Image (cartoon, coloured by chain):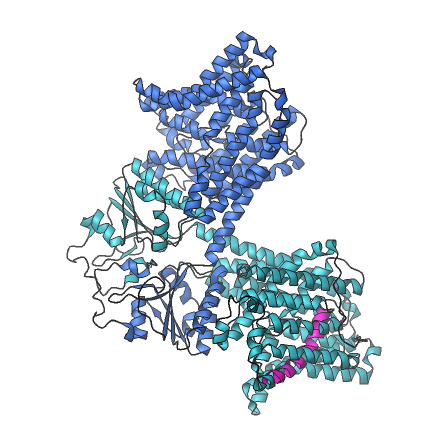
Chain colours: A blue, B cyan
Amino acid sequence: MTDRMNGKGRGVRRFLPILDWGRDYRFSTLADDLLAAVIVTIMLVPQSLAYAMLAGLPPQVGLYASILPLVAYAIFGTSRTLAVGPVAVISLMTAAAVGQLALTTVEGAIAASAALAALSGLMLMAMGVLRLGFLANFLSHPVIAGFITASGLLIAVSQLRHILGIAGGGHTLPEMLVSLSGNLGQTNLPTLKLGLATLGFLFAARSRLNPLLRRLGLPARAADIATKVAPIVAVVATIAAAAGLGLADAGVRIVGEIPSGLPPFGLPTFDPGLWLQLAGAALLLSVIGFVESVSVAQTLAAKRRERIDPDQELVGLGASNVASAVSGGFPVTGGFARSVVNFDAGARTPAAGAFTAGGIALGTVFLTPWLFYLPQATLAATIIVAVLGLVDLGVLKRTWNYSKADFAAVAVTIALTLGLGVEAGVVAGVAVSLALFLYRTSRPHMAVVGLVPGTQHFRNILRHDVRTSPRLLSLRVDESLYFANARYLEDRLYDMVAARPELEHVVLMCPAVNEIDASALESLEAINEQLKTIGVAFHLSEVKGPVMDQLKRTDFLDHLSGQIFLSHYQAIAALDPSLLDRRIAPGSAASDDPSQADDPA
Amino acid sequence: MTDRMNGKGRGVRRFLPILDWGRDYRFSTLADDLLAAVIVTIMLVPQSLAYAMLAGLPPQVGLYASILPLVAYAIFGTSRTLAVGPVAVISLMTAAAVGQLALTTVEGAIAASAALAALSGLMLMAMGVLRLGFLANFLSHPVIAGFITASGLLIAVSQLRHILGIAGGGHTLPEMLVSLSGNLGQTNLPTLKLGLATLGFLFAARSRLNPLLRRLGLPARAADIATKVAPIVAVVATIAAAAGLGLADAGVRIVGEIPSGLPPFGLPTFDPGLWLQLAGAALLLSVIGFVESVSVAQTLAAKRRERIDPDQELVGLGASNVASAVSGGFPVTGGFARSVVNFDAGARTPAAGAFTAGGIALGTVFLTPWLFYLPQATLAATIIVAVLGLVDLGVLKRTWNYSKADFAAVAVTIALTLGLGVEAGVVAGVAVSLALFLYRTSRPHMAVVGLVPGTQHFRNILRHDVRTSPRLLSLRVDESLYFANARYLEDRLYDMVAARPELEHVVLMCPAVNEIDASALESLEAINEQLKTIGVAFHLSEVKGPVMDQLKRTDFLDHLSGQIFLSHYQAIAALDPSLLDRRIAPGSAASDDPSQADDPA
């Protein structure tokens, strides 16, 4: 770990984390990594097939996307336990992006998905090299939570048609519901029975199996892992049922022929028109995938006091997507459930990911003939159970209770993702959360403060019984001063001054002012000049060190009609000593805590 | 004044400030207002003609825009001394907006300018009624300064062709320079001589006349006013010269026939296609005009301890523009120079503006025949001298010294306004300044702090010789915690924790945290959970009252592995008393100023 702590800024090794952990690779580590790889492989096979279907692609594309991308991440990624591959939300975004191209052939969709992976991979790598990982921070948690919840709902609804055995389509909730209700009459009963049985089994495995296994004496971690591989049981059982009962002839749609063998290698088609059409979707998909992946990686790394490098994670995920693009795959990112399984199963290094890739590669060579009879309804049930775990409508209530601004961001994101699609949802969510943040900082909390009798503390005159003077106005502003709130400060201050005809001094109390930009400086200069013309002196108190350094580089302090006071108490003592409580000698308020001087409560 | 202080929220009177000041109107006020009106009228006549020419419109349009708009502002505006009418920057923006329509007739340009005024007026009124005046605050001072400087340069260069007596055009600096240099061979010598003489006179009047008049014993204010009406002298003199010397026959372009009589009333043509094309330009023009006007109004109001209501100012300026649109005018706003003259000349109420309107109306009836011989070069010289006063390239150096972010906003605004035009310049400037603000708040200043020996104060360990413990990490964050910096805090904190194997306690010191949004709350919860898994307790200190109120509405405090301390000193005393200096009894640091506890210097 300490080894990794020094991992920054060492040239080529910054970009090749494998050089760090590969050096010390031991046999005991190998055994741990191999065991984890076997378990993750078993979990990843049905997921890969299902998410390919969700993306509107043939099942083998999902398997291909679970081979080379894992090897690429093992070389370039910084998380020791992140498991990359196809994931639900990214597959949905792929379906939406490719769907808007209105392609008519499966080959066209495969090529477009590969192009999307290539574009997304190159964007992620460029962002990593340029250290632009911080851009992802502008996706707020409420926007992500709203987006994931809405996507989960969209995905679940999109899979209902496979459970019902009917045709359908659409990329928004209204489109899907119209399509579903229109085709409800064609429901295939055998498909519905199989689908409901699989759904029931998977839900039961999720909610009942784990406690059962633990009651039977299995350790908690092993029970968790066993629960997560339940889908493979469903896959095997429904393949047997479909093959044995001839369900395909009864109208149950099966996966059918999957080409066996390793992925086809080759550069994705470079069509400038196509890439341009996909660029916006690729950017959103890259950012969403990165945010999801890095938060999983960070959570797991912190549990072992390891660290990840978000900018290098961009490079790792970018390389994975490029690898996916050149090996017949589609966009990938780090998945939550599989990474947790990988971690719990004891993976120690990214080599576990490479071994998983080997397992999937063996699967594509030897397993694919066995998947011929796999019902699509089984895959749909797997997806529905997985994504309903993502849906968390409670976020609406929680954010409503905590902050109306955050609630607005969640609500807009959910409504627009469901109503207009994934891209509109994300973009609107980010726009709303940024706009509300800017609005809040543009109207900062300000308080006229007075002296709490018998102390050196100042509190809001509206909330506390404090001493004030008509000759002196003490105004505390609880925000950095910048262009969006500079004029607001002027407006408010002029209003207050106009209402106080006896005023002689204004003291602006700045303990929470972390910055004063050029606009705010001009406002302070304007305030100083305006107050000067009416004979009122303008003072500042409790200005922070860096802000003071910046003010010293200007001539503001030369023109200032008043003074700068280190503490507000010193300002009052100098400007209007009549306010001081003479029973208390200055400095005797010793045991009072200094923080309360700027406590707005 | 106290009367106006109570002006808010009184129903219809909020929207009709005239009901406030009109009630107490007296004869002495009338005399003051009339004198100011005479002086402003003399100043406004040449300006109105010149700015109409700058906007690419016939001269009478400028006069029309100086009649009804002033009456409308007198009724709806809240500033007692603001003088509205055509101004340079808004005229330039009008020319650019109408120019992009590629109209071929003067009638078309007049109709489009009136539509622009109508659209802008309606937008301003809507913003006022919806109280959206704060939106203008997102135009930072550097962006405005850069925009005004670049516009001044553009305007001055655009008028050079009238001084040279050649044809020309273009809405960006490169276009204008190419057009000028291509036509330089057609320079008309009599025009050039007249233009240079007028320029010389106006520059001399500006720089020499004022000191001269004061040396002759004129009071400072009277000398200022006399200097500002110098253009009328130039107008009279050059009319006489052009008429007497037959300059029109020598190729000097004169204003020619101006229709005399009152403005033509009528609704502007409502053409949805035209309005849609002009909407973007109208919005920018409205915001720029409002910002310029309100800052003038605010400066003048503050000098007399009066106040203006920015939202009602929007209504006032909107009404002025609608009035301009229905009376043959073009977009108007409050002008700086003429408002200062109005103020200095002693205007007491908006009635002065109405009287000025009367003066201009008399001018349009009786004066226009006398303007037949007015050379266009005279108007161009008036414009150049006026706008060169707006150019302030020093803003580049000042912002460079003060803050690189502000410099970037100025530089981008100037470069794009000159190179791509006024609209691109403003939009890019706002985008850059918002992006840089968001970037700065996304990477807040953080400091690991230690105890200053012998005090209760904590300072940055990198800057000061302070006491720390390997068991305890004290981290102070100097910004509100919100989505854009929440993950940054996590990253930085996990890095610090990973580097400290003996760590038992982390205390986050929050004196400058004015807000914790839902994303930041989730990050704090994640930090708490992660630290818990590795056996490190997470504490907060010096949390502000409103932030604490909000945290109490969640279950964060129930799960918090550590405690909330009122002061950071209390936290240290509780968690690692070995750090305390035993020679100092707690509480004896009495005379130390409390603000220094959160001083990052």
Q: Is residue A168 above or below residue B361?
A: above
**In magenta segment, residue B48:** yes
Return the residue found at the far right. B249
Q: Which residue is located at x 72 percent, y 64 percent?
A: B114
Can I make out residue A124 in this image? no
Left-right relation of A200 to B62:
left
Displayed quadrant of residue A178: top right
Most foreground residue, A130 or A321: A321
Q: Is residue B133 above or below residue A402?
A: below
What x and y, as percent, mark residue A21? 37, 30
Considering the image in quadrants, where does the C terminus of chain A appear? bottom left
Left-right relation of A312 to B543:
right
Q: Which residue is located at x 79 percent, y 64 percent?
A: B107
Return the residue found at the far left. B583
What x and y, as percent, mark residue A203? 44, 23
**In magenta segment, residue A335:** no
What x and y, as percent, mark residue B221? 56, 84
Displayed quadrant of residue B592: bottom left
Q: Is residue A161 above or below residue A423?
A: above
Q: Which residue is located at x 36 percent, y 55 percent?
A: B512
Displayed quadrant of residue B365: bottom right
Numbered range of the magenta stretch: B32-59
Most foreground residue, A246 or B432: A246
Q: How many marks?
A: 0
What x and y, as percent, mark residue A106? 64, 24
Can I make out residue B119 in this image? yes
